[in-house]
Each structure stands twice: as structure tokens, then as C-alpha cells.
Amino acid sequence: MNERFQQVINSPKPVLVDFYADWCSPCKMVAPVLKALKDDLRDNVRIIKVNVDKNPGIASFYNIRSIPTLIIFKNGQLLWSNSGVKTAGELKSILRPHL
């Protein structure tokens, strides 16, 4: 497991992790959604991207079977996980109780 990744997800504020690959078309649709979410929530959430091809150990540890997969962590705890594309509004609703 990647030590830097562990430090990031142990944050007291929610961390939204986008598991993606450069060759994945649906993954490209997630980028503008995450930008809109970040513009809206600003410093209340941290958003990071993890390339599954470059980080197979992390992807395997979290049992990533399809991409894009989004996972929300807080204090190192996995709070929510979902494969596929969500809207910024949907993600905001999911994140709101954890802010």
C-alpha cells in the first residue's frame, strides 16, 4: 500500500478518490464533474485521482473492478464507494453529511 495515499485518506476532511485510467472514455466524463464539485465545496473536500494502471496495488487493495470508481474516505475510513459517472449534485448530496 502506498504510504502517501494512506496519509491523504487519513485526513479529517472528506477525501474523494477517483480511480481512473487514461484510456477510459467514461473516466474522462468525471473530470468536469469533479472540477464543478471542487469549485462548489472548495477546501471542505479533497479530491484526488488514482491511475489504476500506475497504481495497481492501491486499485487491488480496494478491489477496483471497473472504472471510473469513486470512493470517499474520512479519517482513513471508507464511507462510500460507487462505480460509474455521477453528477456533481449527486456527489455533493453524498458528501454533505461528512463535511
Image (cartoon, rainbow, N blue to C red):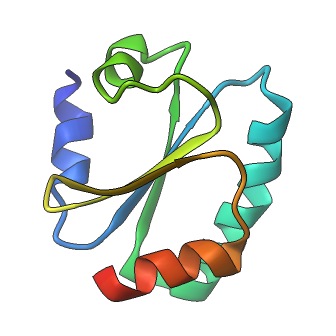
- Between residue 11 and residue 81, name the one nearer to us: 81
Q: Position of residue 88 (x, y in %)?
A: 68, 74
Q: Position of residue 41 (x, y in %)?
A: 52, 84
Q: Residue at x 30, y 80 (%)?
A: 98
In the rendered image, the vertical position of residue 57 relative to residue 12, given as above or below: above
Q: Quadrant of the C terminus?
A: bottom left
Q: Report which quarter residue 21 is drawn in.
A: top right
Q: Is residue 99 visible?
A: no
Q: Residue at x 16, y 45 (%)?
A: 7
Q: Residue at x 33, y 30 (%)?
A: 62
Q: Residue at x 73, y 69 (%)?
A: 87
Tell me if 32 is positioned left or right of 10 in this view. Answer: right
In the rendered picture of this protein, how many numbered marks are placed on residues?
0
Q: Position of residue 60 (x, y in %)?
A: 36, 17
- Between residue 62 and residue 21, name the one nearer to us: 62
Q: Quadrant of the N terminus?
A: top left
In the rendered image, the vertical position of residue 7 relative to residue 41, given as above or below: above
- Between residue 80 and residue 28, name the one nearer to us: 80
Tell me if 5 is positioned left or right of 38 in this view. Answer: left
Q: Is residue 59 visible?
A: yes
Tell me if 64 is positioned left or right of 69 in this view. Answer: left
Q: Position of residue 75 (x, y in %)?
A: 14, 61
- Between residue 54 and residue 76, name the one nearer to us: 76
